Image: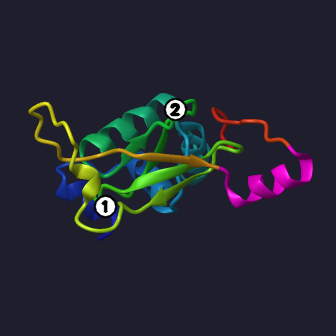
């Protein structure tokens, strides 16, 4: 289903700005708002940062985008929604990758203590060093954390 159909299916107006933001998210990855603004502007020209925040909020409310906020990092967005996947974040450069839920019948949803909640989703973040930062650590002996940057 294309982006126009997705928007209409959710009862949303189709605008150039919304299509541009969806296009950026559909390219994959986990871009920050600044990255989304820069890439969407290349498609539609003038586009304010506030307009992108508004579009992202609307897309998240409609279930077409997901906001993730790794600790110590800028919020990032993705179009992969509804499957309870998780993320691995590099402590060196801030790179974020998807990690499918643990094998089996979603054990990550079976909390030992639910406190009466009906748990429907779990958010897990794995932390480590990506291959490039592992190589850099081996060469330099140190890693300087860059979380909070667009890296």
In-image side of 83 versus 128 (left or right): left
Residue 40: x %, y % from top left: 54, 49
Label 1 Cα neighbours within 10 Å, binned few <14 / some 14-19 / many ≥20: some
The secondary structure that most of the magenta stretch takes on is helix
Residue 25: x %, y % from top left: 46, 55
- Name the front one of labels 1 and 2: 2
The residues colored magenta run 129-141
Q: Which residue is at a point 42% across and 50% down the rendered structure image? A: 16
Per the image, label 1 sits on a secondary structure element best described as: helix
* Contact flag, marks 1 and 2 (Cβ < 8 Å): no
In-image side of 34 versus 53 (left or right): right
* Residue highlighted by disc 1: 4
Q: Is residue 140 magenta?
A: yes
In this view, the residue in front, 118 or 40, is: 118
User: Which quarter of the figure has residue 143?
Assistant: top right
In this view, the residue in front, 45 or 111, is: 111
The disc, 1 or 2, on the residue closer to the chain's N-terminal end is 1
Q: Which residue is at a point 67% across and 55% down the rendered structure image? A: 130
Q: Is residue 61 above or below residue 137?
A: above
Label 2 Cα neighbours within 10 Å, binned few <14 / some 14-19 / many ≥20: few
Q: Is residue 43 above or below residue 125?
A: below
Q: How is the image coloured?
A: rainbow
Q: Quadrant of the N terminus?
A: bottom left
Residue 76: x %, y % from top left: 50, 42
Q: Which residue is at a point 90% across and 47% down the rendered structure image? A: 140
* Residue highlighted by disc 2: 71
Residue 82 seen: no
Q: Is residue 98 magenta?
A: no
In-image side of 107 versus 125 (left or right): left
Mark identifier at residue 19: none
């Amino acid at each position: 289903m294309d982006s126009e159909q997705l928007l209409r299916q959710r009862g949303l107006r189709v605008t150039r700005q919304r299509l541009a933001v969806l296009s950026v998210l559909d390219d994959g990855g986990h871009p920050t708002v600044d990255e989304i603004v820069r890439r969407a502007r290349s498609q539609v020209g003038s586009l304010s940062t506030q307009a992108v925040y508004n579009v992202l909020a609307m897309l998240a409310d409609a279930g077409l985008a997901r906001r993730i906020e790794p600790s110590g990092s800028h919020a990032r967005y993705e179009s992969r929604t509804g499957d309870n996947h998780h993320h691995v974040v590099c402590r060196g450069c801030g790179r974020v990758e998807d990690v499918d839920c643990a094998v089996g019948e979603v054990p990550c949803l079976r909390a030992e203590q639910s406190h009466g909640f009906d748990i429907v989703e779990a958010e897990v973040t794995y932390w480590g060093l990506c291959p490039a930062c592992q190589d850099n650590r081996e060469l330099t002996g140190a890693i300087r954390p860059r979380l909070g940057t667009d890296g």
